Image (spheres, rainbow, N blue to C red):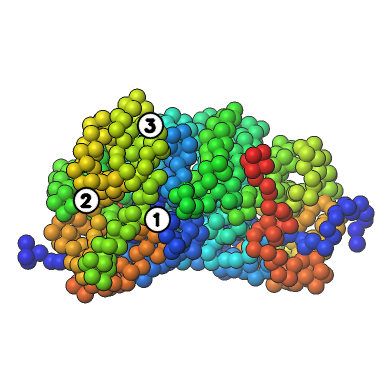
Amino acid sequence: MSQHSHPRSRSDRTRSVHLGVDLTDAGAHPAAWRTLGSQAQRLFDAQRLDALVATAQRGLLDLVAFDDAFSLQPVTRHGVQGRLDAALVASRLAPRSAGIGLVPTIDTTHTEPFHVSKAVATIDHVSRGRAAWQVGWSTTQQATDAFGRKAAQDEVDAIDEAGEVIDVVGRLWDSWEDDAEIRDRATSRFVDRDKLHHVDYEGIRFAVKGPSITPRPPQGRPPVVVTATSDEALALAARRADVVRLRATSLDDALAQRARLDDLAGDAGRSTDEVRVLVDTYVVLADDESSARARLELLDDLEPSSWATDSLVHVGTAGALAETIETWVAAGAVDGFHVRPSSLSTDLDVLVHRVVPILQSAGLFRTAYPGRTLRDTLGLTRPANVFAATA
Amino acid sequence: MTTRPRKQIHLGIHFPGVNSTTVWSDPDSGSQIDFDSFEHLATRAEAAKLDFFFLAEGLRLREHKGRIHDLDVVGRPDTLPVLAAIAAVTERIGLAGTINTTFNEPWELARQFATLDLLSGGRAAWNLVTSPDAFTGENFRRGGYLPYAERYERAAEVVRVARALWDSWDDHAVLADTATGRFLRDAGVREVVHDGTHAQVRGTFTTPRGPQGHPVLFQAGDSAQGRDFAARTADVIFSMHSTFEAGRAFYDDVQAHLVANGRNRGDLKILPATTVVIGQTPDEAHERAEHIRRQQVSGPTAIAFLEQVWGRDLTAYDPDGPLPEVDPDVENISITRGRVRHTTDPLAVARAWREQAEANRWSIRDLVIRTTTRGSFVGTAQQVADDLDRHVQEDASDGFILVPHLTPHGLDDVLDQVIPLLQERGSFRSDYTGPTLRDHLGLARPDPASQHAAAELTA
């Protein structure tokens, strides 16, 4: 169905397409909160979030993601301002959901790697293996001023530091071997301390002794998600990410980025099968294309600056979106889509109730969660422990 | 005093910690990690109408003789994410967590607690602690540690900045007027500028003010500095229960400190932590308590405890035999790291313990059991209810934080049998009267007018 006839030689052709959805604010369009059903008054209310996750879970989506940053959203003329801490939101949503992955953005520039490690591990524990971590970094003066502890960093430096943090966080997750807790009454020992490890990390910017205070999470290492917002971010993703979110506006663009990603991952000694690639896709969905365009016009009228997006935009029907997904995946550009609904109250429902069934009937999308953990859903194996391997 | 209205008892429940109070060797001991354990304790406590659930933290695993201490429960999940998850499975009970001010920054702390307060409908509490040691600092960017006096200076500054950040959003700052497109009310959110000794913060805060305005602030009051800090700043003081008389003296002292700091009696709730053991008869309760103490202090635990004072390896000694003849190695007193030490003169302590043990024919283990036994309530359900109530009515405390010895079922019997007796006598609520933890504790909500107090920090 595509003129792009260089399908990748993926070993597992029966694998489901992967679909994530972004639940930040009221939707990706700045005027989303003003639309019917947005529940703008309840934007910071846990029950609203529970309902959104339940919808995404009914659609068997891989994961829900929440953006975060230490600075308030810039003042657009009519946009949402205010955020909750995304890690705590993800944790709050865990006991009331099942199957679906929970992915908060957590900053690496101003936070303590030790705290990040145990926060993500804990979301994984309370969700019984459904956490992932979207790696954030800050280059803004606002975030720097909020902490007042170091100078603002440019993107290259911040991404370099993010790489260090990912490294040490992974080691802290591994600092408890899976069977460290022994409860051996004969010797009165609760843990086998030979299976607890100091990580002894001495980085350029910080040192962390370890071990973690939190036992190894159910997934071993919850998946690390990196958005390839620049060449440096793509390179970081190739080295360290389990899930990569591409920003691409055309299939050729995505194919080129995927090829670069695969090369860099290979250079880092990684197999391409260890990495899942999604493309960020902004969607405005309706029963026919003209209605979708009308919806976008309405949103744009409410927020009179044009909608600034940085990746693929789909304004049209559920069927056309399903077709795009099929084409991009068949071409080997991506393993799935990370959908950014223009308006959560409308587009999430269409995604779950219209797009997903089309993909399911085409045999492209799962009809049940394959296991209990997010790694199971993503088809990623549970990683070995670096300390156990070298012991 | 007889005409004084009956005081209402405030009760929290402590999730079992990583120390020898928590018995893991019992067949009924459950996981300290699985969310089921947290859900069980929190929902049982909520069914009993307790004020709050309490979760401690530690930021470095304890080490003993240069190795990770392996005799006690070790390992726990992160405090605030656990409390956020418990918010999903409970509706009323308060959610209190220990968070360190030495190794956290005020901007991040303020948004985490504001988030927890919003997600829980106004049930968040922060038990503020400071860290004394470079040992813990090795896990953090800032490394090092603060001199003892500066720990509380930093804590006070962190709280001041956090409160300014919470107050920088008016209660009704979010307008969300879909018709006009105004999301925030004009001037409903103000920039905060703080240029202090321990924190430099400037910016417009990200998170709306929580239902309680400020989360309830707890502070451990066992040290003099902690007590002073609590009298100036906290809503709840968390201490260790010992005896009725000591409780009375502590209570009076705290009230005097409170008044000296321009606050009113009753503005600060005094809630000692205690264990409770009940039985069908007094004898059965005391037998159970003795059994639990022996579970808590195994032979190796007794030896390790002694090594903290002796500063030497004592593993060659029999825990069921007499105390060591050899004197403590005074050059090596930091044999255990990652816990607070109280011993100032090991030689004198060792001498006193030897004399006590000889006089009573105690083994090492007997001595450690006796030495580490803290005040506890032991008896029939009726006796314990009477005793708890007496402590509160006669101002030895305003209530208690109950500490189970088993995860997560250790206090199920107390909740089932003692709470109804307290309710019968009118000393404990039979239902929650409001949605927030401040409602449960009878604490006023910080008036938005108090925002003027933060004016110096607000541009």
Using the image, tell me which numbered label, if any, was put on residue B242: 2
Q: Are marks 1 and 3 in contact (CB under 8 Å)?
A: no
Q: Are marks 1 and 2 on the same chain?
A: yes
Query: Which chain letter goes with mark 3?
Result: B
Mark closest to the chain's N terminus, 3 or 2: 2
- Depth check, front residue: A205 or B107: A205
Q: Look at 21% across and 70% down and name the residue there.
A: B382
Image x and y of residue A125, in percent:
55, 56
Closer to the camera in the image, B202 or B238: B238
Which residue in the structure is indicated by mark 3?
A: B312
Query: Quick one: SS at disc 1?
Result: loop
Give the label, 1 or 2, closer to the camera.
1
- Of the 4 image quadrants, the one containing the C terminus of chain B is top left
Q: Position of residue A327 (x, y in %)?
A: 85, 59
For the residue carrying disc 2, how many other residues have a C-alpha within 10 Å: few (<14), some (14-19), or many (20+)?
some
Circle 1 marks a residue in which chain? B
Q: Residue at x 65, y 70 (%)?
A: A58
Is the residue marked by circle 1 packed among few (<14), some (14-19), or many (20+) residues within 10 Å?
many
- Under circle 2, the secondary element is loop
Circle 1 residue = B23
Secondary structure at badge 3 equals loop
User: Residue A197's image quarter?
Assistant: top right
Whether labels 3 and 2 belong to a single chain: the reply is yes
Cβ atoms at labels 3 and 2 below 8 Å apart: no
Q: Alpha carbon of mark 1 to alpha carbon of mark 3: how far?
A: 26 Å
Whether tag 1 and tag 2 are in contact, CB under 8 A, the answer is no
Q: Amino acid at mark 2?
A: Ser
